[in-house]
Image (cartoon, grey):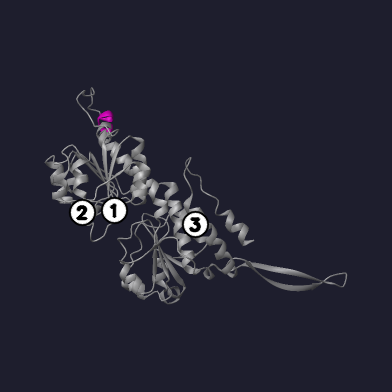
């Protein structure tokens, strides 16, 4: 019964044509194993009573009830719904495998709840994982982060408690690459400005000298050729772009597949590119990777695009570069902090596009990240190989 019910929950979600459901592949095998090992918490228990019948025989009546949800592994979440909680549909998905415990429930009954919590599901960087929380969860085994970036988690501290950390790199690559291309195209063609002109009540005619630049056959420099950077390169190839990339290690297989050229020195990439796209993890080495010096190396006609983390750019230096036309424009899906203070100078410039960190904000991506996070958590709890474990450096 469990198997048929569990696998009915794992039907691939509707996706765009050609899009693979990678999370489904991960979770399929793990949930099957989870069902085998944890059947006591999911199947029905029966108590039998016998009653006399007219034929002198005795009949059996089964009183059936579902096991209490508390017998499922406890997973701590910040909340359900609202402006900061886990989305309702994701909570429904999580409940198939876990007993959800909100932060409010945990704080109201720490003594009881702390024993049940074996995992924390981190959604949109929440809840905050600090030493106090870790000390209060003696049975915690894994923190499942929904998303690829883990700069909001102190990996060394978490590891010192014997707790594993996982992320969801496979679910985020396509949608994040999509937003990178969207920002590049929108900035190149001045899409936001154009929309404002088109709908403004003051517009009487369209100016003939209002021009953008072309993406087709331009040079794109990708800083960070991981899974997302590679997806960006695939898309850029369809625009006949010249593709340069800088990475800690040369990726010969990837560069051959998309016709990219490796720049061992980031400076060489900056000097040649019409568009520079940042696709790196935020680490001590990449914090303020792009500052005044790097911006000065870029073409005055170049555009900087950031789909990684806001702190990868020195924002004060970027404001100065945009104000003084050191570079043509910037397109940012991420800033530091998020959101920016309402009086921040970046918000007053007309040669910058800023979106509210929506790289993975699609119906499909959010669902796939939750599936991948579930697969990771189940793997840890069942002592199986972990699809996407993150290790402290």
| Mark positioned earlier in the residue sequence (2 or 3) | 3
How far from the left and from the top, in percent, is residue 326? 13, 41
User: Which residue corresponds to mark 3?
Assistant: 26
Magenta segment's dominant SS is: helix
Does residue 99 appear anywhere in the picture? no
Of 103 and 388, nearer the camera is 388
Residue extending furthest left? 324
Q: Measure the C-alpha gap from mark 2 to mark 3.
A: 34 Å
Near mark 3 (Cα within 10 A), the count class, few <14, some 14-19 or many ≥20, is many
**Does the CB distance between marks 2 and 3 fall below 8 Å?**
no
Of 49 and 26, nearer the camera is 26
Q: Measure the C-alpha gap from mark 1 to mark 3.
A: 25 Å
How far from the left and from the top, in percent, is residue 77? 41, 63
Near mark 2 (Cα within 10 A), the count class, few <14, some 14-19 or many ≥20, is some
User: Which residue corresponds to mark 2?
Assistant: 289
How far from the left and from the top, in percent, is residue 307? 29, 48
Asked if the stretch drawn in magenta spans residue 196, the answer is yes
Near mark 1 (Cα within 10 A), the count class, few <14, some 14-19 or many ≥20, is many
Snapshot quadrant of residue 347? top left
Left or right side of 138 for 299: left
| Mark positioned earlier in the residue sequence (2 or 1) | 1
**Does the CB distance between marks 2 and 1 fall below 8 Å?**
yes
Q: Quadrant of the C terminus?
A: bottom left
Asked if the stretch drawn in magenta spans residue 367, the answer is no
| Mark positioned earlier in the residue sequence (1 or 3) | 3
Left or right side of 65 for 25: left
- Element carrying mark 2: loop
Q: Quadrant of the N terminus?
A: bottom right
Residue 280 shows which numbered tag? 1
Q: Which residues, given as a range, are shown in magenta? A: 195-200
How far from the left and from the top, in percent, is residue 369? 43, 54
Left or right side of 47 for 189: left
């Amino acid at each position: 019964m469990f198997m048929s019910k569990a696998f009915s929950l794992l039907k691939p979600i509707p996706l765009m044509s050609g899009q693979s459901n990678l999370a489904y592949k991960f979770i399929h095998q793990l949930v099957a194993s989870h069902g085998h090992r944890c059947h006591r918490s999911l199947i029905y228990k029966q108590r039998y009573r016998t009653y006399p019948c007219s034929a002198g025989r005795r009949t059996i009546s089964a009183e059936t009830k579902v096991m209490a949800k508390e017998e499922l592994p406890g997973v701590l979440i910040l909340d359900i719904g609202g402006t900061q909680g886990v989305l309702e549909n994701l909570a429904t998905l999580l409940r198939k495998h876990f007993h959800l415990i909100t932060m409010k429930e945990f704080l109201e009954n720490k003594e009881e709840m702390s024993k049940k919590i074996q995992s924390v599901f981190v959604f949109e960087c929440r809840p905050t994982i600090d030493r106090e929380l870790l000390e209060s969860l003696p049975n915690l085994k894994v923190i499942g982060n929904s998303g690829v970036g883990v700069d909001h988690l102190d990996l060394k501290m978490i590891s010192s408690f014997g707790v594993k950390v996982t992320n969801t790199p496979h679910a985020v690559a396509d949608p994040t690459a999509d937003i990178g291309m969207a920002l590049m195209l929108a900035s190149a063609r001045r899409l936001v400005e154009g929309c404002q002109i088109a709908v403004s009540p003051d517009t009487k005619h369209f100016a003939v000298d209002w021009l953008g630049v072309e993406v087709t056959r331009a040079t794109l420099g990708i800083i960070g050729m991981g899974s997302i950077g590679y997806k960006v390169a695939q898309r850029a190839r369809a625009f006949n772009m010249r593709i340069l990339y800088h990475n800690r290690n040369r990726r010969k297989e990837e560069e051959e597949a998309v016709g990219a050229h490796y720049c061992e020195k980031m400076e060489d990439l900056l000097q040649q590119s019409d568009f520079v796209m940042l696709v790196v993890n935020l680490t001590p080495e990449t914090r303020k990777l792009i500052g005044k010096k790097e911006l000065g190396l870029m073409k005055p006609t170049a555009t900087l695009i950031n789909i990684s983390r806001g702190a990868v750019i020195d924002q004060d230096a970027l404001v100065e570069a945009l104000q003084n036309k050191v570079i043509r424009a910037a397109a940012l899906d991420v800033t530091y902090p998020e959101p920016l203070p309402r009086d921040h100078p970046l918000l007053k410039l007309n040669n910058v596009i800023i979106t509210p960190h929506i790289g993975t904000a699609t119906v499909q991506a959010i669902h796939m990240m939750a599936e991948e996070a579930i697969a990771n958590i189940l793997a840890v709890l069942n002592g199986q190989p972990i699809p996407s474990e993150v290790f402290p450096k």
